[in-house]
Image (cartoon, rainbow, N blue to C red):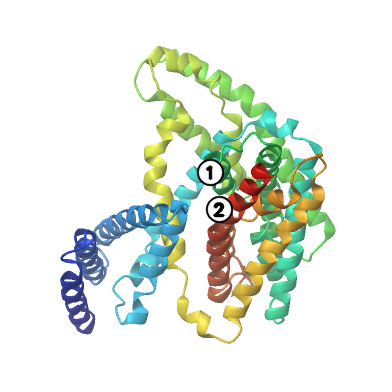
Amino acid sequence: MLDDSVRLRYYCATMRLRATRSHLALPVLLGTVLASGVAHAAAQPHGADLPPVLAALVLILLGAKLGGVLVARLGQPAVLGELVVGVVLGNLGLLGFHGLEPIRELAAIDLLAQIGVLFLLFDAGLESDVGKMAAVGGSSLLVAVIGVMAPIGLGFACSAWFYPGHNPLSHWFVGATLCATSVGITARVLADLGRTDSKEGRIILGAAVVDDVLGLIVLAVVAGVIKAADAGQAFHATTVVWIVAKAAVFLAGAILVGRWFSARVFKLAARLTGEGLLLTGALGFCFGLAYLASFMGLAPIVGAFAAGLILDEVHYQDLRERDHARRAVPELLEPITTFFVPVFFVLMGMRVDLSVFGAPGVLGFAAALTAAAVVAKQACALGVLERGADRMAVGLGMIPRGEVGLIFAGIGATLTIAGERVVDDAIFSAVVAMVALTTLVTPPLLAWRLRRISTS
């Protein structure tokens, strides 16, 4: 620790001199002080668990906000900045400072990140509309199906080509990480250009929502098969059918029964006295379905997403009127997601090991995976049936992977087959690079194509 302390003091002094006349002086100085605090707290006896968690949270939250603001000035989504901050913090060891490495192993931070994922999917479900999902045209459904199948196939091929010694189920999981489109990134670009209600916009957004649902089912299937294989159970086609059936029954049952149950629970809550019942009920509903999904052998995020789809503003309207609440559930959740979600993205970034890109083939694998992610989504254009809709714009709008790809990679890092991780450090880093690159290239490409359509 002595060498790290000396290096840190030298680093602090150097950065202080360079940033004195810069508007970034305060964040730099604060960051170095917090880094010192994390390193010091992590070196204390094991009983002192809280101090390193507190120091890590301050560093993660402030770093995420600063990174988000900086990339937003470049016209990019804040999630990209949060990832970059995580990558920087997690790879300071390459510069000789290893004080922040214990953050990646803190169980409390990992738990907060997992809760952040639940909130992320719950919020995505709240922003989706079951009625609109059911009413999407043939183009949206066909685009979504192609947008899941093509990436899985190309992702499998890339993984099998670069890592022929890995278990075939590992290749399927890599393919699964490519299948889900990030709704938020594309929706932001369409909104900024005023093209949300265009033919292309409706097809892209409808397909992206269906894409996410199909992606969660794919995740449930692949993860279930991998767990069965790791437990020594023989692979049977009935295993896949059973997992698909469980996922479909859970989602359908949750939507049908859950909507009935939700309406009555919130009506009952409106008769109770006390404050904060709306937020408490919504959180309980989210966590309850997440637990039920886990109990059925599915990923908890499937339950959280279903909870968001189920919960409708009509269900808790009486409770809002009783409490004179001005904000709906998504608005009440905003402060909570502002805390939890960046923890997930920064931690995912910290788990990217840049040193693995120096190993033979890893950089090539990341490039091939990114190319497969882009090319596979262009196949979505084949599913556009509406006349007058621009096929290229639809294909470009389906490119970004974002948060769902990271969630898949994070889950894959926890799965094993015969003692080997399904997603090792090299694959994980390549997936994160793919997510970052697809997130980066989509906004300018989609904006260019939509502007060209509007002027032609």
Specify the quadrant that holds the N terminus.
Answer: bottom left
At which x and y percent is residue 68?
39, 53
Q: Which of the marked residues, 2 or 1, is nearer the chain's N terminus?
A: 1
Question: Could you tell whether 358 is left or right of 446 in the image?
Answer: left
The reply to whether dot 2 and dot 1 touch (C-beta < 8 Å) is yes
Mark 1, Cα crowd under 10 Å, few <14 / some 14-19 / many 20+, is: some
The answer to whether residue 11 is visible is yes
User: Element type at marker 2?
Assistant: helix
| Type of amino acid at the residue the image marks with label 1 | Arg
At which x and y percent is residue 391?
75, 49
In the figure, residue 412 lies in which quadrant? bottom right
Residue 303 to residue 87: above or below? above
In the foreground, 383 or 33: 383
| Type of amino acid at the residue the image marks with label 2 | Pro
Residue 72 to residue 322: above or below? below
In the foreground, 423 or 395: 395
Query: Which residue is depicted at the point 73% across and 54% down?
Result: 148
Question: Could you tell whether 291 is left or right of 348 in the image?
Answer: right
Where is mark 1, residue-wise? 188
At which x and y percent is residue 181?
63, 51
At which x and y percent is residue 294?
59, 47
Where is mark 2, residue-wise? 443
User: Element type at marker 1?
Assistant: helix
Query: Which residue is depicted at the point 74% across and 34% down?
Result: 136
Specify the quadrant that holds the C terminus.
Answer: top right
